[in-house]
Image (spheres, rainbow, N blue to C red):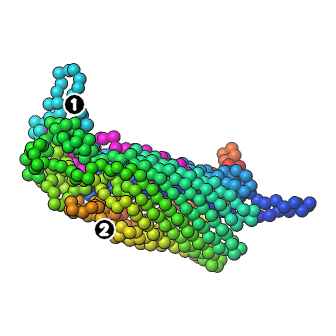
Amino acid sequence: MKRILLILGGLLLTKVYAQTSNDTVFKKRALDNTEVNWLLSYYNQSGDHAAVTGGIGNEKLKDFAQNIQVSLPVSADHVLNVDFTVSAYTSASSSNLNPFTGASRGDDDDDDDDDDDKWLDNNTGSAITGTPWVASSGASYKDVWLNFNANFQHYSDDRNKIFGVSASIADEFDYFSAGGGLDFTYIFNEKNSEISLGTNVYFDHWRPEYPTEIKTYFETGGNLNADFFKDVPIWDENGNPTVKTGNNTWRPSSEGLIENKARNTYVLKIGFSQILSRNLQFSLFTDLTYQTGWLANPMQRVYFADKPNYYIGNAADIPRYTSKENKGVFQLADDFERLPGKRFKFPLGLRVNYYVNEFMVLRSYYRYYTDDWGLQSHTAELEVPLKISSGFTLYPSYRYYIQSAVKYFAPYEGHYSTRKYYTSDYDLSAFTAHQFGMGVKYTDIFTRMKWWRIGVKSIHLDLNRYVRSNGLKAFIISTNLQFVFE
């Protein structure tokens, strides 16, 4: 499961000097007025390779996000940039962290006459059912992701040097992140050349959530007659009930739950931009990234090819488990995703912008990526802004993406228990993807449209369609409004 996070921002640097009759020199402020960008986006996804259910199952996801970016002129030489993101989503895949409709009932400790038989079904032997093809009503079905960033910039008197320091925090139901960074930009060669350097560190802490059956197993010391498992039959692959105290029943991997709950990320950013002519500009950039700690997702199940299969729910659905016709049985996981505790990422990007005429610009982008997990990818994008009037511009775009699989990936029941690392997350599989986009932008650099002291500088609407070769499809709509407080 992946969610799309949209980050927009940019500063236009100018150097303007005016001189009074008494030869006192004034310098233009780095930023004259407070500027606000308000971004709204809606993302809708579908697919059949949910990682939470081991590489098969419902991937439906809806996400609504808001991002507010504010640039404040603190003084003539200093600018404070802050942005805040709220992303609220519902996910069929995440909901199946606990796919069992009667799960977590616990013991009946009250004094009434009810007993645990009320959870049993005459046909299946248990009212606890689940399926990877239908979203559960569990608490993990929806959540909110919060992110806050602040960046303080100092501009030199000639506006050719920019120093920045930043801090960030992010929070979701299963992790917390805190980070910071430093950056430096140097503009030279009569503002035709620019070099940027930066570094960021992020210290994350997992509040791990696990598949219900694995978490319950280890918390009860392997007692399959306690808590969630109480009075719930476990079926073998032939639909026969197993003896829970015997050897021929379900047991997850003996690895246990995770102990190292930290994930640290270190980033080195390098960029170079050059204006080659009145019509041509290019830039090169890289974000070298090193990660340590728990880099896998404990929510994501894995199933082994060399282990027997065991199920909870309607035994009659076992033969059609991998089909959408399965409405009532769920396979107990062999383990959750496990990956190496270190990862080095090396991306290298290139942008080339060519001004054709006053009505058309060609914007191209290419990025190569590789890491020590074996993933390699290529991204190519072309955007062609078309000016259709003094205020309106169309932005048709196309992006092509291709990647290889990490060496630890295998599909549902494609792994073996003898391996140390394994994942069935299709985000780490081999696939190609196409994204088709169309945007329209209204620009008013003089902010003639005003409400009180607020001027509207631009309004941008984007529509994008994303399609993967493994069946995942998504639709994205976003709008960006830029305001100036005068």
Count of numbered labels shown in the rendering:
2
Q: Is residue 435 above or below residue 88?
A: below
Quarter of the N terminus within the rendering: bottom left
Query: In the displayed image of the protein, which residue is found farthest to the bottom?
Result: 277
Under mark 2, the amino acid is Lys
Q: Is residue 290 left or right of residue 248?
A: right
The front one of 58 and 106 is 106
Q: Is residue 393 left or right of residue 110?
A: right
- Gap in Å between the C-alphas at discs 1 and 2? 44 Å
Does residue 410 appear anywhere in the picture?
yes
Please tell me whether residue 440 belongs to the stretch shown in magenta.
Answer: no
Under mark 1, the amino acid is Asp
**Residue ID for mark 1:** 107
Region of the chain picked out in magenta, as a range: 126-149
SS at mark 1 in the image: loop
**Marking on residue 174:** none
Instruction: Return the x and y of residue 277 as percentages of the image width and height.
Output: 64, 79
Instruction: Return the x and y of residue 64 as percentages of the image width and height.
Output: 44, 48
Mark 1 or mark 2: whose residue is earlier in sequence: 1
The front one of 82 and 455 is 82
Are the residues flagged by discs 1 and 2 in contact, CB closer than 8 Å?
Answer: no
Instruction: Identify the residue at horizontal 47%, vertical 64% (top origin).
Output: 289
**Residue ID for mark 2:** 407
The front one of 318 and 415 is 415
Does residue 360 appear anywhere in the picture?
no
Instruction: Identify the residue at horizontal 17%, vertical 21% (top origin).
Output: 113
Please tell me whether residue 145 belongs to the stretch shown in magenta.
Answer: yes
Neighbourhood count class around disc 1 (C-alpha, 10 Å): few under 14, some 14–19, many 20 upward: few
Instruction: Identify the residue at horizontal 30%, vertical 53% (top origin).
Output: 300
